[in-house]
Image (cartoon, rainbow, N blue to C red):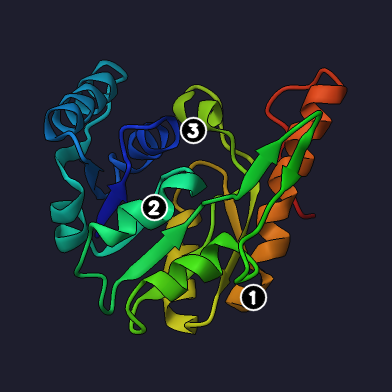
Amino acid sequence: MKIGIVGGTGGIGEGMALRLAPYHEVIIGSRDVEKACSVSEGTVAYLRDQGSKGHCIGLCNQDTVDEGDIIVLAIPYRFVESTLQELTGFEDKIVVSPVNPIEKSDSFYYAPPDEGSAAQRIARLLPQSAKVVTAFNNIAANRWKDLADALDYSVAVCGDDDRAKAEVMQLIDTISNLRAFDAGPLRMSSIVESITPLLLNLARFNQMKDVGIRFV
């Protein structure tokens, strides 16, 4: 399976590539192709140093969309619309949104668009045949990158296409100790996304690190 990560040179994208590359073909996408290639080469080299093999290449964002079977949008919410306006070829693709619309004043707070959630806005911006799935919203970037530390979180997954959602859940269950849970249709994404500012505030006000969720 080819996993394309749009915005793959950011913290979450790099970390996801490290976790996925030993088991899948990973494509790191960026507006800066040289940076994408550098990060992909670094990913393969780091995995080799850890005694593991990885398949990872760097491409521009458009080629990443064209080549990937599943496309992950590892981009900040404020760049969602401008990034998607530059890209085509999402028809019939599974598009994973770990995007959280968050603002900060004296604390972090959820600031969803008029559509109700980032995932729903992404669905509106993409072709109707694109299958948007919400996942990975509540995992910190630094936890992705620390391969010595198992990811033992629960991952809530939302989507309106049952097959796409099942495929993403299956992918999640191959990553470290993550466990996927079906959280219902895409309209439930607002609840999943809004958990992230709660976790950030819990960490900040209680001197905690890497707060996550686990359903038992």
Give the image quarter of residue 55: top left
Query: Which badge, 2 or 1, comes first in the chain's sequence?
Result: 2
Q: Which residue corresponds to mark 1?
A: 187
Q: Residues within 10 Å of mark 1 (few under 14, many from 20)?
A: some
**Picture residue at 14% right of the left edge, 59% below the top:** 67
Which image quadrant: the N terminus? Answer: bottom left
Q: Is residue 149 at all visible to an observer of this figure?
A: yes
| Residue 40 at x, y percent in the picture | 20, 31
| Residue 42 at x, y percent in the picture | 22, 22
- Kind of element beneath mark 2: strand
Q: Which residue corresponds to mark 2?
A: 73
**Mark 1 belongs to which amino acid?**
Arg
Which image quadrant: the C terminus? Answer: bottom right
Q: Is residue 213 at all visible to an observer of this figure?
A: no
- Left/right placement of residue 103 relative to residue 43 reads right
Give the image quarter of residue 95: bottom left
Q: Which residue corresponds to mark 3?
A: 144
Contact flag, marks 2 and 1 (Cβ < 8 Å): no
| Residue 104 at x, y percent in the picture | 71, 34
**Mark 2 belongs to which amino acid?**
Leu
Q: Identify which residue, 73 or 167, lies in the foreground.
A: 73
**Picture residue at 19% right of the left edge, 39% below the top:** 56
**Picture residue at 67% right of the left edge, 40% below the top:** 103
Compared with 35, 135 (above or below) is: below
Compared with 127, 148 (above or below) is: above
